[in-house]
Amino acid sequence: MHALGEYVRVSTSFRVDRWDAEQTEWARRQLGLGRHATITPHEFASAGRGGVKPYLVTQEDDCNLIVQAGWVALLGGVAGTTMSPKFGAANGRIGVGTSSTAASYTQTTLIGDTGVSSTTSYFKLVSGAPTISTGSSPPTLVFVSVFGTGVANFAWQEFGTDAGTADSVSNSTTGGTFFNRGVSNQGTKASGQTWTATETISFGFPSGAGTVS
């Protein structure tokens, strides 16, 4: 006899758009920005007459796990203690690190995050408030962070999101709730390059119908 069960699937697409050092410097001059300014994808697109396209775009799907603290935050919003502070333009970061250790439900930060002096992780404040889309199936939550020329210059093997309020190397500094962690080999970011990370988290079983097991 088979039990009838319904499963809520959570899937994340992790996309990285990359501009090399030469592209970044040229766009900076065209836009009249200071040497240490971080250039957004919109600004790259508006630089010069035709804009500057990324030299490489990669995306990996189904590479993410909502960790325990993330589910506490999600379910607390339905019945329980609401997450505080909630994610927003000033409360949310994408973190990247160097570890390829498999994602686990009990993890509380990136594995590459070794603390306040970490050189193998970096958390970047989101570029704006996370985008929530509930008008289509499946509903999505999207975070975007732009990693400028002088940060996160190491092998990107993992990523995650927390509710931190400022750029830092660790979740232990202004970290807040650690929501998710994924493993995705994106290659090595070099000094002078600009990489934009986009997380698209999808919620719900694709068919909308349950699963017989």
Image: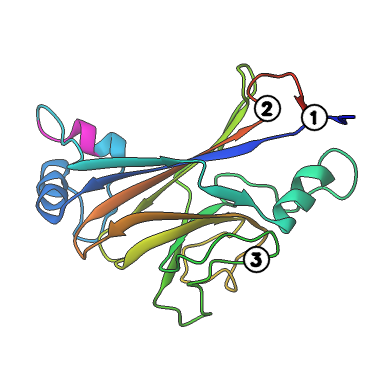
Q: Main secondary structure of the magenta part?
A: helix
Mark 3 or 1, nearer chain start: 1
Instruction: Describe the element under mark 3 as helix, strand or loop.
Output: loop
Q: Nearer the viewer, residue 165 or 101?
A: 101
User: Along the horizontal axis of the image, is 208 left or right of 192?
Assistant: right
68 left or right of 23? right
Disc 2 residue type (three-letter)? Phe
Residue at (53%, 56%) from the top-left corner?
160
Q: Is residue 45 magenta?
A: yes
Residue 99 x %, y %: 45, 68
**Which residue occupies the extreme front position in the image?**
1
Which residue is at 70% across, 52% downward? 70
Image spot of residue 168 (x, y percent): 47, 68
- Residue 152 seen in render: no
Q: Amino acid at mark 1?
A: Glu
Considering depth in this image, is 51 or 121 the residue closer to the camera?
121
Q: Which residue is mark 2?
A: 205
Element carrying mark 1: loop
Residue 65 vertical position relative to residue 55 in the rendered view, above or below: below
Magenta span: 44-48
Mark 2 and 1 residues: CB-CB less than 8 Å, in contact? Answer: yes
Q: Is label 2 in a helix, a strand or a loop?
A: loop
Kindly report the distance in space between the C-alpha atoms of the residues bearing marks 3 and 1: 26 Å
Q: Which mark is residue 107?
A: 3
Among the 4 quarters of the image, the one containing residue 49: top left
Residue 51 makes an appearance in the image: yes
